[in-house]
Amino acid sequence: MHVPDGFLSPAICVLMYAISIAFLIWSWRKARFTYSRSLAPLLAVSSAFVFAAQMINFPILYGTSGHLVGGTFLSVILGPYAAILSMTVVLMMQALFFADGGIFTFGANVFNMAVIGGLSFFLVRFLTKDPKRSGRLFLSIFITSLVSVVLGALACGLQIGFSPVFSEAGGVAVTVPAMLFWHVLIGLGEAAITATLISQLHRLQPTVLSGLAILRGKLE
């Protein structure tokens, strides 16, 4: 899902930068008043996990790639605001040091993975009426993780398809179906992994789930 430089038009790059920066400012302001200092070690560990998971890429379309995203995982572990910031740091490291995603397209990549992934927390909160019920929690996280991956792929397909570079190749009529087809499959795998990991952490070490604490109203 990382979009390299040269794939998006300048107008789309500027637009996605503006949208992503607005969300980052909002997340930073909310995070400052929401989380305690004890969040820092957990943020570092969870970010490292997602960083490693995202380095496993599968080629999809015209040089783009598919991979595990980890947005919903981070949102439940850290909460929505820290998840957006954490994923942005991961994407920045990948773009600067591993050429995984471009600099000009960085805003688009942040929106597709960090913003959509972090905001998926609110779908988990909507679906999870009682966080203490492990079955309900598993299903909510499974559905949300799948939806967040598909929405990120849809956004990516639209951004690429509406760029002039791909107009002769069919535009969105080609890019959107191609991105959605593969990312539905990837999303099912990610949903199963994410729901299983969160459910086990909830059972064995519930205190590390700051996002779950927000679900219970303990951090807001």
Image (cartoon, rainbow, N blue to C red):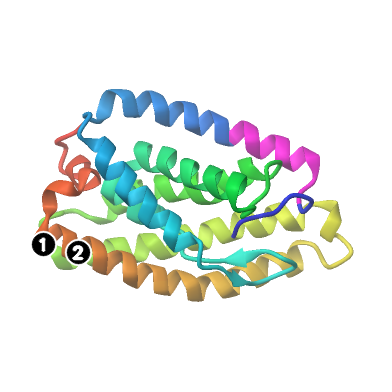
Residue beneath disc 1: 203
Snapshot quadrant of residue 211: top left
Residue 202: % across, % down:
15, 58
Residue 3: % across, % down:
66, 55
Residue placed at 44% from the left, 50% from the top?
117
- What's the CA distance linking mark 1 and mark 2? 6 Å
Q: What residue type is labelled 2?
A: Ser
- The disc placed on residue 112 is none
Disc 2 crowd, CA 10 A, few/some/many (<14, 14-19, 20+) = some
Q: Give the main secondary structure, helix, strand or loop, of the magenta stretch.
A: helix
Residue 121 seen anywhere in this rendered image of the structure: yes
Q: Do the residues labelled 1 and 2 touch (CB within 8 Å)?
A: yes
Residue 36: % across, % down:
21, 29
Q: Which amino acid does label 1 sit on?
A: Arg
Disc 1 crowd, CA 10 A, few/some/many (<14, 14-19, 20+) = few
Residue 9: say if magenta: yes
Whether 8 is drawn above or below 217: the answer is: below
Residue placed at 79% from the left, 40% from the top?
10
Residue 176: say if magenta: no
Q: What stretch is highlighted in magenta?
A: 8-19
Viewer-closest of 37 and 149: 37
- The disc placed on residue 199 is 2
**From this viewpoint, which residue is outermost toward the right?**
168
* Quadrant for the C terminus in the image: top left
* Quadrant for the N terminus in the image: bottom right
> Is 37 displayed left or right of 143 in the figure?
left
Residue 56: % across, % down:
51, 67
Residue placed at 10% from the left, 61% from the top?
204
Q: Look at the numbered disc 1 and give the secondary structure of its residue.
A: helix
> Is 78 displayed left or right of 115 in the figure?
left
User: Across the whole image, how many numbered discs are drawn on residues?
Assistant: 2
